[in-house]
Every structure is written in C-alpha cells, then in structure tokens.
Amino acid sequence: MTLLDDILQRNDSVRLPTPPAIALRILEVVSADEVDFNQLSRIITADPALTARVLRVANSPLFSPKANVDSIATALTRLGSLQVTNIALSFLLVQSLRAHSCHNGFDFTYFWKRSITAAVAADLIGRQCLSRNDNLFIAGLLHDIGILVAFGLVPDYAALFDGRIHRRLPLSQEEKERFGFGHCQLGAELLHSWHLPAAITEPIRHHHQPDTAPALWRDAALAIQLGDRIAAVLHGKPAGPKLQALRETLQQQGLSENDIDRLLQQIFRNSVRTLSFFEIPADQMKTAEELLQEANQHLSQLNLCKRQLLDDARLQQQDLLRQTERLHAVNTELSRLAFQDSLTGLYNLRYFHDHFDRELARAARYGNHFSLILLDLDEFKQVNDRHGHQAGDLVLQQIARVASLSLRDTDLLVRYGGEEFAVLLPQTDLAEAEVTAERLRHHIAACRCPWQGQELQVTASIGLVHSSATADKNRLIQLADHAMYRAKTEGKNRVCRARPATAS
C-alpha cells in the first residue's frame, strides 16, 4: 500500500479533514439530475452567517447585479445554482479547513491569501482568454489543498518548505521523488472523496502540467496554473522573471500588453474584495503598479546585463581577433621560415619540390607544359677560398637579386643548394626557355659585386629541359642536371638543352 493510499483510506494513524455537514447536504442536492432550487435555498438559509456572506458576495462588484439581491432564492435565480453553490461551498470549506488546521510552522493566513487570489485570477483568466468555467473560482481556491493536508499528515513534508534548504527540483517533482505522489493528486483525490464534481477535481489534479490534462479540463488546468503564478508574485515572490513568463503565456492566449495590465489590476481589486469576504487581511499584497515597477526594474537589470554581456563579448571578439592576427602572423613567419632560404630570401628546395608537384598535377589535368632550368655558379669555390665565405654570401645574394629581375612574376626561382639555383617556367616551351636561360646567363656574367675595393664576378653553367620530355619529376631534374653538367664540361658560362636522345 502506498503512502497516498494510506492517507486516503483514513487509517487510524491519520485524520483527514472532512467537509461540514451543510456542505455535504449542498453537494447532495446539486449532484441530482435536476437541482431543487427551493431545497438548496432552505439549506443555505438555515445558516444565517453563511447566508449573509453569500448575499454580500452576490451584491458586490464581482457580479454587479442590476438590482439588490436580498435572498438566496433571488441569488439562485439571478446568478444560477452553480455560482451560488460554489460561493457557499467556498466559505464552508475554507472555514472548515482553517478550523482543522493546527500544524505548527505553517502560515495559514498566507496560504489562504494565495489560494483566494489564485481563485480570483483563475476565474478572470478563464473568462477573458480561455473557455468560461463557473467552477474555476472554487477549483482555484482549493487547488493547493493537498499541501495543507500533506503538511500535517506526511512525515518530513514540511522540510520541502524550509527556506534554508534549496530544492533541487520543482515542488511537484520533488514530492513525487520523495513521497511517491504530488499534492495535486492528493488534493484531487481528497475532493473526489467529498463528492465534488470532476469539473473541480480534474483541473486541480493537472494544474501543474496542463498539457497532460484531458482536453475537457485543459483550459481550466491552465487557468489555475496561471492564477497560482499570479498569486505567487502578488504575495511576495520576485515578480521580474515570473511576471515576464506569465505575460508571454497570456499573450499566447490572445491578450495584448494593455489587456494584461488591465487584467492584473482587476485581479488585484477583486482579490482585495474577496479576501475581505473571508475576513482575511490583504496586507503586504503587491498592487498591479508595484508588479509593473518590479518587472521594469528586472527588465532594466536584464538590459544592463545584456549590454554588459555584449560589451564583454565585443571585447572578447576583439581580443580573439588580435590573437587570430598574431597567430596568422606567427604561422606566416613559420611558413616563411619553412620554405624560404634565409641567406638569399628565395624559396628553398622544400618549397621547390612542393611547387613542382603542383605544376606536374596541373600539366596532367589541363594539358599545360613547362620548362625547368638548373644553373650552377662557375668557380664559386674560388670566391670562398680567396675572399672568404662572407664574400661568397654577398655574391649569392647579388646573383639571387639579378636572377629575380630577369624572370617573369609567374616564374619560380629557388636556391637549390649551395651555389645552385633552379627555375620553373610555367607555360613555357623549350625555345622560350632557352631565351630565358640565355638572358639569365648574360645578366649573371655582367653582375659585379663590390668587395673590399674589388669587384667580384662569376658566371653560370645552365641546363634546361622541357616537360614534354617526361612527366616524371625526378627524371626531369636528372635531365636538367645532366645538361648543366655538360655545360660545365663544354667550357662553362653557357646554356645546354637536355639531349633529345637522352630525354627520350
């Protein structure tokens, strides 16, 4: 047997509240197929205090009667049996439950303030933007009766309301996790045992999750949920974030901003009147204007936080941009160091091979052709031996500048190694490559490098090959190298083509 079953079966260990006899008689009459107005009027009139309260409500601005309602019979005729019944039951049940309540540490005045305000709010919300339901007031009034009962009958239930302990989950989920049921279920089952109709008990059962309610009770469950949330902010909870969420939900139901403001003002006015009917003070209840002020302050704080977040994000973006720029500069420098010859500033052998592979790929894909030049400075070792390596470095730098000026922007000049250089000439046939090679040879031979009062001069032996000879990179380099070697052996300072017989 579950704890909920144990409570509802009224074992000796628990004492459930029960409705007063007059309430049971009223419920018996209204549950009949045809309501006997005379009998209902006699039952209510038999209690002078209840009669006075019902007539006071019937004549209040809550119902705005066109003429004075001076008897229960008149009230039944003008307001209808359902309205009069619910008004009478509200007074009877609240009075009975307040008398039954004797739990230490439970703030009953606050509980009924919230419950009555929630009832007023649920009723108005139902009338203005959901389906009209004359049971909404009493359903809203009793929607948290499960809390009242559980507080006195369920061990450790009061700990859920200890402000010093932070709840991990919303109340309904925390209840189910710890006790196996929620106060909505307990309240609905208790009221069902009192023979209250499903139009009251089922919206109460589902008001924490209206979407799960059967379609017949879904609007009523939503109205109670919204009424409860409005009651919470009117009676002390911070209004900012909760009120904003409420406004968004009410807007989804078709209310404008002005409609919502008027609704909140009406809820406040009607709640104050209704609390007086139950002889409960409306002190410390926020006005609609105070709610709006809280909401505006919250919105201002949100806007301030938003601006701060935007400023922080902008600063972070700027910092990230600076870091990205620095990273790009570092990567560019690393790339330069990886592919650039530090002495001459030309690309190095590693870059040459990468570029050569791409050139071969383009040639294979698009049918392009290119030529390759390899050149070696003649007698360069003598420059180092006679004048030192610093002089040799100067000569290499000067030759790199002269050679660069002798080539097109699309040509690639690299330091191949030591005193050797290589040139890739895209879209260049053998005849054009030979003209370029001769121009290089001539400009290198004409170059003079001042060094300690002397002019240093070198020549170059050049070999060249056209890509039509082969599509193999290593073979092309080998052919160009053989041609360059032949230029050396034939007297230096000359250009030699790769031999056709060898190229084949």
Image (cartoon, rainbow, N blue to C red):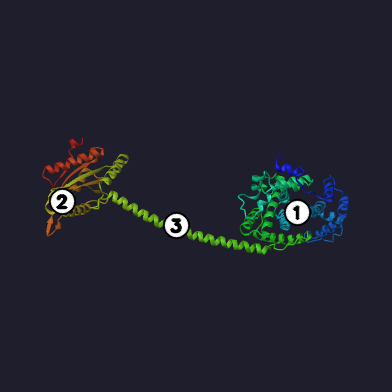
Residue 320 figure quarter: bottom left
21 lies above or below 66: above
Neighbourhood count class around disc 2 (C-alpha, 10 Å): few under 14, some 14–19, many 20 upward = some
Seen from the viewer's position, the closer of residues 89 and 490 is 89
168 left or right of 267 in image: left
User: Circle 2 — which element?
Assistant: helix
497 lies above or below 53: above
- Whichever of callouts 1 and 3 sits on the residue coming sooner in the sequence is 1
303 lies above or below 355: below
Q: Which residue is mark 1?
A: 102
Quadrant (top left/top right/bottom left/bottom right) for the N terminus? top right
Tell me residue 105's x, y (percent): 70, 55
Seen from the viewer's position, the closer of residues 26 and 64 is 26
Neighbourhood count class around disc 1 (C-alpha, 10 Å): few under 14, some 14–19, many 20 upward = few
Quadrant (top left/top right/bottom left/bottom right) for the C terminus? top left
User: Circle 1 — which element?
Assistant: loop
Q: Which residue is mark 3?
A: 317
Seen from the viewer's position, the closer of residues 211 and 365 is 211
- Whichever of callouts 2 and 3 sits on the residue coming sooner in the sequence is 3
Kind of residue at disc 2 = His
One can see residue 396 in this view: yes
User: Circle 3 — which element?
Assistant: helix
Kind of residue at disc 3 = Gln
Find the distance from the CA under tag 1 to the CA under tag 3: 61 Å
Q: Which residue is mark 2?
A: 442
One can see residue 203 in this view: no
Kind of residue at disc 1 = Cys
Tell me residue 269's x, y (percent): 73, 62
Tell me residue 160's x, y (percent): 66, 51
Callout in the foreground (2, 3): 3
- Whichever of callouts 2 and 1 sits on the residue coming sooner in the sequence is 1
